[in-house]
Each structure stands twice: as structure tokens, then as C-alpha cells.
Amino acid sequence: MLDKHMNYPEWQKPYRAALVEVNPQKLSEKIAIAEAAISQRARELTTNNWDIDEHLAVRDAAFNLHVLKGQQPIEISSRLDLKS
């Protein structure tokens, strides 16, 4: 049902699953799955399908997961090279 409201379901679905997880034993696993999906998509965005809106959404999601883990966020890429 939530998929209808996701612009980028391939990584947003595991990301949202991590955000709503309340079981501490499952949270680390859900975060790891979401981080893997986000990292994969970030690599794809830098090589092929440049989409500024998705790039910003991926960056924000990565930041939020690191906050959720209680860690200092790492930078995925704040460089906004708009391809012609």
C-alpha cells in the first residue's frame, strides 16, 4: 500500500522499514539492508541516471539512517554536478 506513495521504491521500501522498526533486535538488520539499497542506488546515480531530486532524497535518507544508528553521518556526495 505504501508503494503508491514512494517515488523510488527500490530503496525507499527498505529505508521506510528501518524507520518504523520498533524492535531493537531487528533495527540493526533493517538499517543495514536500507543502507545497502541506498548505497547501491547512490552508485547508480553517479554513473548513469542523474536525477537531482533522487540524489537529494538518497543523501537525506543516508543521513537519517546514520542519525537513527546514533552515529556521525558520512557524506554520500554533496557535490551537485548537473550533467548537460
Image (spheres, rainbow, N blue to C red):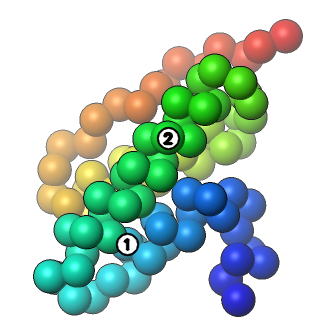
The residue depicted at 29 percent of the width and 58 percent of the height is: 32
For disc 2, the neighbor class at 10 Å (few under 14, some 14 to 19, many from 20) is few
Quadrant location, the C terminus: top right
Name the outermost residue toward the top: 84
Could you tell whether 63 is left or right of 48 in the image? left
Instruction: Determine which residue is flagged by label 2.
Output: 40
Which badge, 1 or 2, is on the more N-terminal residue?
1
Could you tell whether 44 is left or right of 77 in the image? right
Taking depth in this image into account, of 74 and 45 the one nearest to the observer is 45
Vertical placement of residue 82 versus 22, above or below:
above
Percent x, y of residue 70: 15, 58
Could you tell whether 11 is left or right of 52 in the image? left
Instruction: Determine which residue is flagged by label 1.
Output: 18
Could you tell whether 5 is left or right of 63 in the image? right
Q: Residue 59: in sight, yes or no?
A: no
The residue depicted at 74 percent of the width and 30 percent of the height is: 49
For disc 1, the neighbor class at 10 Å (few under 14, some 14 to 19, many from 20) is many
Q: Quadrant of residue 46?
A: top right
Vertical placement of residue 39 versus 65, above or below:
above
Q: Amino acid at mark 1?
A: Ala
Q: Amino acid at mark 2?
A: Gln
Q: Residue 17: in sight, yes or no?
A: yes
Is mark 1 in CB contact (under 8 Å) with mark 2?
A: no
Vertical placement of residue 33 versus 80, above or below:
below
Q: Nearer the viewer, mark 1 or mark 2?
A: 2
Vertical placement of residue 58 versus 15, above or below:
above
The residue depicted at 31 percent of the width and 63 percent of the height is: 31
